[in-house]
Image (spheres, rainbow, N blue to C red):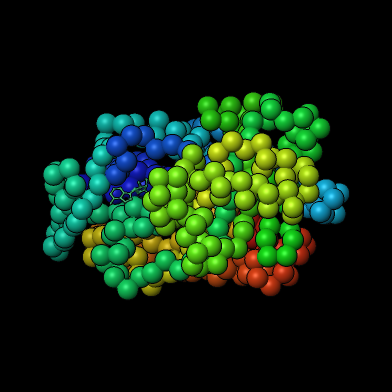
Amino acid sequence: MNISIVGGSLGGLTAACLLRDAGHEVAVFERSPVRLEQRGAGIGFLPATYRYLHERAGIDLAKISVPTSHIRYLDALGNVVHDESHNYLFSSWNTVYASTLDHFGTSNYHLDFEMKNFSQTPDSVSLNFVNGHSVESQLLVAADGIGSMARNTLIPSSKSVYAGYVAWRGMVRESTLPASVCQQLSDAITYFVYPHSHILVYPIPDHDGRVTEGDRLINFVWYCNYEVGQELTTLLTDKNGLLREVSVPLGLVTESNVASMKAMAQANLPTVLSDIVQATAEPFVQVIYDVEISRMAFGRICLLGDAAMVVRPHAAAGTAKAAADGWALAESLEKYDSVPLALEAYQDSQLALAQNLLARTRRVGAKSQFLNTWDPQDPEVIFGLHSPGN
Ligand SMILES: Cc1cc2nc3c(=O)[nH]c(=O)nc-3n(C[C@H](O)[C@H](O)[C@H](O)COP(=O)(O)OP(=O)(O)OC[C@H]3O[C@@H](n4cnc5c(N)ncnc54)[C@H](O)[C@@H]3O)c2cc1C
């Protein structure tokens, strides 16, 4: 088949590799005029996220990720109050994107192709792009992310629901930190949980993908509640005065918002974690939203990854969900001769997966941000796509 994938991030690219492996002609259309970069900094690197790179592309995971073997919790004074052995892998969005794009190649990866609209007949889908090009395909995979125009068109009633908090994020080079701090943070995911908030810190590859100790970055994700209205609007108004919806990217957060956030870190976080925040040159903000839908399949069009449902990051499973959608789609298309039937089967499994994950991540978010019932021993706080740890 001739397949168009709209959105060339991790979800779209993984699906593209899988569908090409299955013998289809695949083209990826990405809105950005340049290769994507720096999206989301660190990621918990779950098996579904690396499955393609590991199983099909033959990439050595040790070259693109950083292992940690402990989960640690600190108290306000920086004392370790909980320490358990648990293995995680962490990577960075950039490293995974670069590896996947290198494998897919750039000849069928089209930058500066923003989908404007689309329509379908029983036999084909037509796509029109802002740059004036049009394409006909037998299947459209919409992997166009949280603000998906495909989802908004196909399900006009779908909504992004603000979770009540944002993630402040940033990275610092290990080489710029005191050796004692690196030692304390380098082999663990380190948490500090306090009323209505929590921060987690872990090592990731650097901007060039280097994973050796000393070359890496220490990444933080700090969940903070902001009230809808003036408080949130001030935070999301960038340096150029533009009110952002989903994120305020690196370099665009106003100096006064950075200063307030750093003061908040100093007042609330243990010194070792506050020092990481203070040392971050360009922190950025991602708003936490839930998007829940009840359909992913529409004839010859399907939604994939965040274009379908958006879950909170507490299971570190957003890219894993997007990648798992790609595997399920490739398997369904292999199994059924009819595209609409294949997409219905894809929808059955992937909708259930996303709904389960959304419910779990909502519970975890509520425990830390609103109920103050987070417990380090609670199995639900362990990362995982299908269930905690899985
Ligand atoms: C604070 C935070 C922490 C997170 N931590 C983790 C983690 O630890 N592990 C993890 O796995 N996930 C994590 N995630 C989630 C993860 O980042 C997302 O789930 C994942 O990036 C979704 O991938 P995607 O390919 O579906 O969509 P996206 O990455 O959003 O990509 C969508 C792409 O579509 C393009 N596009 C949009 N509209 C159009 C159009 N009209 N035409 C053409 N192209 C278009 C966009 O430019 C973009 O490149 C986190 C998210 C947040 C907010």
Vertical position of residue 325 compared to residue 107: above or below: below
Q: Quadrant of residue 362?
A: bottom right
Question: Considering depth in this image, is 354 or 193 the residue closer to the camera?
Answer: 193
Vertical position of residue 217 compared to residue 268: above or below: above
Residue at coordinates 63% horizontally, 41% vertically from top-left?
Answer: 219
Residue at coordinates 44% horizontally, 36% vertically from top-left?
Answer: 37
Q: Position of residue 3 (x, y in %)?
A: 24, 48
> Is residue 209 shown left or right of residue 24?
right
Residue at coordinates 47% horizontally, 55% vertically from top-left?
Answer: 236
Q: Quadrant of residue 366?
A: bottom right
Q: Position of residue 233 (x, y in %)?
A: 47, 60
Question: Considering depth in this image, is 124 or 251 the residue closer to the camera?
Answer: 251
Q: Quadrant of residue 106?
A: top left
Question: Considering depth in this image, is 138 or 310 the residue closer to the camera?
Answer: 310
Q: Quadrant of the C terminus?
A: bottom right
Picture mark count: 0
> Is residue 46 shown left or right of residue 197?
left
Q: Is residue 138 visible?
A: no
Q: Is residue 256 visible?
A: yes
Q: Position of residue 23 (x, y in %)?
A: 28, 42
Residue at coordinates 68% horizontally, 30% vertically from top-left?
Answer: 174
Vertical position of residue 305 compared to residue 345: above or below: above
> Is residue 134 shown left or right of residue 148?
left
